[in-house]
Image (cartoon, rainbow, N blue to C red):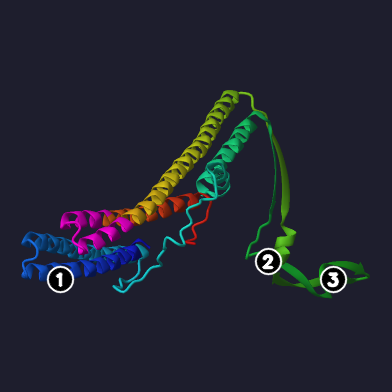
Amino acid sequence: MRRNDVTKENKCRYQKNFNQGKQVERLNTMNEVGAIAPALLYDLKGQLANDELSIVTNRNALNSSKLLLAQLMNVPYNGNLEVEQITADTLNIQYDNQPATLYELSVKQLALVKAAEFRRLSAEKGVKVARSLYYPTVGLSGSYNTNYSNAARRDLPLSTVEVASDDYVQVGNDKVPVMTKRTDYISQKISYSDQFNNNYNTSVFLSVSIPILNGFTAKNRVALAKIALKNAEISAQTVKTQLSQNIEQAYFNMTAARDRYRTLVQQVSDFSESFRTAEVRFEAGAINQVDYLIAKNNVDRARTNLISAKYDYIFRTKILDYYKNDLSLD
């Protein structure tokens, strides 16, 4: 936005140079007929050249600012870049929020404050964790396991037949063999699921640990945790205090910039009227070129200061908008 006001200032300078060029032409005509001293003409020409040099300087500053803006935005540079211009008619010189209101909003929204508060809460939990070392510890655990072997096999009955055994009974003179039953089996690999179900075992363990000799260790840890908590509390309060001071300083800077802008608005109006009068009197020959140039330099300087003051005020208001999480460009 500052870049476009440089363009606006250049346009004003072009208009003034056009008028001043007319004055130079008028004095040149008068000098040719001997109506004025040559020094009057050359003084005005020197001032015209000085203004033309200012136009070149400002044009270079404008292009340099466009390049810097493009680099900050990480976009390709375009010499025809145009940015939104804020005029004095749309500038709101009444800031609605007070430092206390801005502080309340920023405490709730700024990540810096939230981070400090979370660190304090974490330190509070750390004290509770350290205190837990004073209490007995009860542990309960259990296990469930099984085993598997790829060599495990089982025999399954296949058929049963009667066969003669080595024993016999004497029947008369004959020996009659004793019959017995024999079962034939087939070997089969035991599956994984069967082994898993057949070989599992479980266990449950209950343990109780009562702190007796580690009391000093627990005490030291609690003391360290309390120190960490105190540091976190001090840090959180320091962040809030610095935030409050920064807001108050930013608000003071904003009001100072606003008052300066209001004063310069009136100054530009006064010097503009003074220059208009001086220009009319200079054309009428009522004043010399020195008085004319003084009036012109005064209004130029006042307008330049007004542009600077306007954007300084806008910048100060945007700093305050940051604290209330409002960075819109309206």
Secondary structure under the numbered disc 3 in the rendered image: strand
In the rendered image, which residue does mark 2 sit on?
Answer: 192
Percent across and percent down for residue 208 are 70, 34
Q: Which residue is painted at 47% across and 53% down in the image?
A: 93
Q: Within 10 Å of the Cα at label 1, are there few (<14), some (14-19), or many (20+) other Cα atoms?
A: some
Q: How far is the residue under mark 3 from the one under mark 2? A: 33 Å
Q: Which residue is painted at 74% across and 60% down in the image?
A: 198
Which residue type carries mark 3? Lys
In the rendered image, which residue does mark 3 sit on?
Answer: 181
Q: Earlier in the sequence, mark 2 or mark 1?
A: 1
Disc nearest the viewer among 3 and 1? 1
In the rendered image, which residue does mark 1 sit on?
Answer: 25
Q: Is residue 22 one of those drawn in magenta?
A: no
Q: Which residues are magenta?
A: 272-298
Q: How far is the residue under mark 2 from the one under mark 1? A: 112 Å
Question: Magenta span: helix, strand or loop, mainly?
Answer: helix
Secondary structure under the numbered disc 2 in the rendered image: helix
